[in-house]
């Protein structure tokens, strides 16, 4: 019987819709006060229910974690995974419930937190370590290991603004990887660097889990969860819907997590998702030819279509799509690079439609989800919608000759392939005899 | 490698708080290394990014002193007691510039550190406090120039100079008090960013920098002391230049005003702290 390292009891976190990551100006406050007053004056059917303005990002989540256990947390975007980590690492307070954690808690919600471009590699290691909560003596003791792990020995006295993106990421992760609290909370930080570096990072994480450290790990990478964790919980809409062995929870999650949502229409721009600058009108996925409701097979060319209102004259807008498969792997990113009519031109106010044509024989079989980003001036993401569309790519009916199993891989292209006989064996054999 | 004895194990409890929350000095002490590193970073970055580096710490008060001497001292003929006007003005501009810099840095500190606030837990009080402490370096450099200037004018300070650290402390406390209010408000209302320069500018003119506080008539000087910097600047002039009588009622009022602002600022900051990460 191991000791309990973490006990979460009925944790809940309530946000006002739109409150997350927004601040106000005094003008907004005055405008809101005026609106409430007007509403009160014009109310006939009693006050509006307040429930519609609040959302429980995390709702009644309880679990216990033994010392040395590694817990994987899975769920769709917006299911409350990050909120849970933020509560447990004390960045934000729960609205209700409580959690008791034994030992030193360390959270890695991001690598390289507090890195300053003007400071050298050496200085940033010290600063980043202090921000994570490593005592100075510990940082000094591990300094050489960190530098070696990151492979930046020659640049340690160089300001990190001169580092390449890869070096920057490696240094940041190296500090994080040498962070050894009793309870380690990690949010999807493994997605940095090249494949070889990621492998080393996974090794470090596995070491942490095996050395008796308690680990909480959020990831979309099911393979990582399965190999690293001894247990998994699945969050859905802020609630914990499954708790158990990782492979069992993962397969339940994968079988139900994505349901087809291939056509969204928001007829009223006032309540449509969007921002002050842009409002969505429609998002859909349909086959290139035939009825919009026809299934999409691996061979079917299809169209991803968005209609949106541009509310700000002169804006330079472009959409950017991220297409994920059901393992959470980003299969591709699409941008209007080949679009010639509106590219680089200011958009007048009005309704726009973008169509992205995806050829057949690209995606593999399975559910896919699309994340939409609306980008202004090629730089600022002014609106982001995770899982705005979800669609299924089905296997072609005819069975490929001699191949009855599923194809593996994120994509399933049809590639030109040649096989030819270069020489006959009996001729070779004859030559020998 | 990391042997953790069970004696060192502490239990952290995460739960909702409500209303006013106490300042936890023990927790602040626990995070003293981070406090040190953030201060150190603020200082380093400040001098790395600027072409003139430390010269800025001197140029700003010095040029202001030249302009003040010309327009207020020479042309407007504002009295400066028994010391030359340039020294009179500079002795006030050195603590004033410290106050103004510290208030601006502290007031914007939380918003500028928003990425860290959203990703790591630590007592948020550290952030504006580190900004105030980092501003002391500029102050120290400018202070050396002030001493050189006194030397050039042949002004020898009396034993009163021994009280100077007290006034430096009061200046820092004033800056922290105002910085706490502004930084917390800045998270909630981004207008504050634009209010700070304006506020500091107005504050300069209601503080006895360009003129002596003796210009304020008798019954009102106590009220004038409600401006924390009135007491601080008068104290500086008295401790360094040996001007007039030692600070009295006005200083008492200033100290009370600083204490009230600081306690209020701490309470307000702690109350708002829990929502910083959600809003920033």
Image (cartoon, coloured by chain):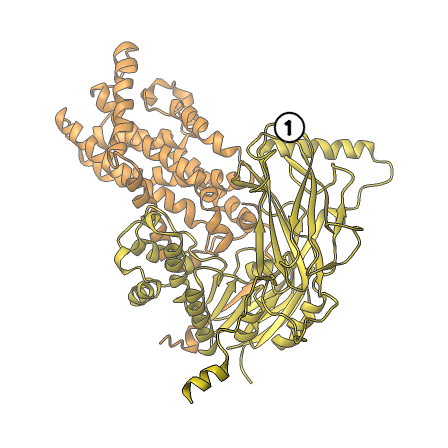
Question: Which residue is drawn at the image coordinates 26% and 28% (left, top)?
Answer: B59
Secondary element at tag 1: loop
Quadrant of the drawing holding the N terminus of chain A: bottom right
Q: Which residue is mark 1?
A: A348
The percent coordinates of residue A414 (x first, y second) are 61, 62
Figure quadrant of residue B230: top left
The residue at the far top in this view is B75
A137 horizontally vs A20: left or right: left
In this rendering, the answer to whether A319 lies above or below A41 is below
Viewer-closest of A388 and A303: A303
Chain coloured yellow: which letter?
Answer: A
Quadrant of the drawing holding the C terminus of chain A: bottom left
In this rendering, the answer to whether A37 lies above or below B125 is above
In this rendering, the answer to whether A345 lies above or below A243 is above
In this rendering, does residue B20 appear at all?
A: no
B126 horizontally vs A1: left or right: left
Which tint was used for chain B? Answer: orange
In this rendering, does residue A388 appear at all?
A: yes
A244 horizontally vs A210: left or right: right
The percent coordinates of residue B132 (x first, y second) are 36, 42
The residue at the far bottom in this view is A433
Viewer-closest of A244 and A191: A191
Viewer-closest of B68 and B161: B68
In which chain is the residue bearing label 1?
A
Figure quadrant of residue B166: top left
Local crowd size for mark 1, using a 10 Å CA cut-off: few (<14), some (14–19), many (≥20): some
Question: Which residue is drawn at the image coordinates 41% and 63% (left, top)?
Answer: A176
């Amino acid at each position: 019987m191991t000791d309990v390292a973490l006990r979460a009891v009925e944790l809940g976190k309530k946000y006002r819709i739109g409150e997350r990551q927004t601040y106000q100006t005094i003008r907004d406050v005055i405008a809101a006060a005026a609106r409430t007053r007007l509403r009160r004056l014009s109310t006939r059917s009693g006050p509006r229910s307040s429930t519609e303005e609040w959302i429980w990002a995390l709702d009644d989540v309880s679990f216990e974690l033994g010392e040395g256990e590694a817990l994987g947390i899975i769920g769709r975007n917006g299911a409350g995974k990050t909120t849970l980590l933020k509560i447990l690492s004390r960045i934000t307070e729960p609205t209700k419930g409580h959690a008791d954690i034994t030992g030193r808690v360390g959270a890695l919600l991001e690598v390289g937190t507090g890195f300053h471009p003007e400071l050298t590699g050496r200085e940033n290691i010290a600063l980043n370590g202090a921000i994570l909560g490593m005592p100075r003596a510990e940082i000094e003791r591990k300094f050489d290991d960190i530098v070696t792990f990151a492979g930046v020995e020659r640049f340690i006295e160089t300001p990190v603004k001169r580092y390449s993106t890869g070096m920057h990421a490696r240094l940041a992760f190296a500090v994080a990887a040498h962070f050894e609290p009793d309870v380690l909370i990690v949010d999807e930080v493994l997605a940095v660097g090249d494949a070889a570096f990621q492998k080393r990072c996974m090794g470090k994480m596995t070491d942490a889990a095996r050395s008796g450290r308690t680990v909480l790990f959020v990831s979309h990478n099911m393979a990582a969860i399965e190999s690293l964790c001894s247990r998994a919980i699945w969050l859905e809409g802020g609630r914990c819907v499954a708790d158990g062995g990782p492979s069992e929870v993962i397969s339940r999650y994968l079988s139900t997590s994505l349901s087809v949502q291939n056509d969204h229409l928001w007829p009223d721009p006032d309540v449509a998702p969007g921002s002050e600058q842009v409002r969505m009108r429609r998002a859909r996925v349909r086959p290139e030819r035939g009825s919009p409701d026809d299934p999409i097979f691996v061979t079917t060319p299809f169209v991803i279509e968005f209609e949106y209102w541009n509310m700000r004259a002169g804006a330079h807008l472009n959409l950017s799509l991220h297409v994920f498969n059901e393992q959470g792997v980003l299969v591709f990113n699409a941008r209007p690079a080949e679009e010639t009519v509106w590219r680089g031109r200011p958009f007048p106010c009005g309704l726009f439609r973008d169509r992205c044509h995806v050829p057949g024989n690209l995606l593999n079989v399975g559910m896919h989800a699309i994340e939409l980003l609306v980008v202004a001036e090629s730089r600022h993401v002014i609106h982001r919608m995770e899982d705005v569309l979800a669609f299924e790519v089905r296997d072609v009916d005819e069975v490929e000759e001699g191949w009855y199993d599923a194809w593996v891989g994120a994509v399933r292209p049809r590639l030109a392939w040649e096989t030819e006989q270069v020489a006959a064996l009996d001729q070779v054999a004859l030559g020998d005899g | 490698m990391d042997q953790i004895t069970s004696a060192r194990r502490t239990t952290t409890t995460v739960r909702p708080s409500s209303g006013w929350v106490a300042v936890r000095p023990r927790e602040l002490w626990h995070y003293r290394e981070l406090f040190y590193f953030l201060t150190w970073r603020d200082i380093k970055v400040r001098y790395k990014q600027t072409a003139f580096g430390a010269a800025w710490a001197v140029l700003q008060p010095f040029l202001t002193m030249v302009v003040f001497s010309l327009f207020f001292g020479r042309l407007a003929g504002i009295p400066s007691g028994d010391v030359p006007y340039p020294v009179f003005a500079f002795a006030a501009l050195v603590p004033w510039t410290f106050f103004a810099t510290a208030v601006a840095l502290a007031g914007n500190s939380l918003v500028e550190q928003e990425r860290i606030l959203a990703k790591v837990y630590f007592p948020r009080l550290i952030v504006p406090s580190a900004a105030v402490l980092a501003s002391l370096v500029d102050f120290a450099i400018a202070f050396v120039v002030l001493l050189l200037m006194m030397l050039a004018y042949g002004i020898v300070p009396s034993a009163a100079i021994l009280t100077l650290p007290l006034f430096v402390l009061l200046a820092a406390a004033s800056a922290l008090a105002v910085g706490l209010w502004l930084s917390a408000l800045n998270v909630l209302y981004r207008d504050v960013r634009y209010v700070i320069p304006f506020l500091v500018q107005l504050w300069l003119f209601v503080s006895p920098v360009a003129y002596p506080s003796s210009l304020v008539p008798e019954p009102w000087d106590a009220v004038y002391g409600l401006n924390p910097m009135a007491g601080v600047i008068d104290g500086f002039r008295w401790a360094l230049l040996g001007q007039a009588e030692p600070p009295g009622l006005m200083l008492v009022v200033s100290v009370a005003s600083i204490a009230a602002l600081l306690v209020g600022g701490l309470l307000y900051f702690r109350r708002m702290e829990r929502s910083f990460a959600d809003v920033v």
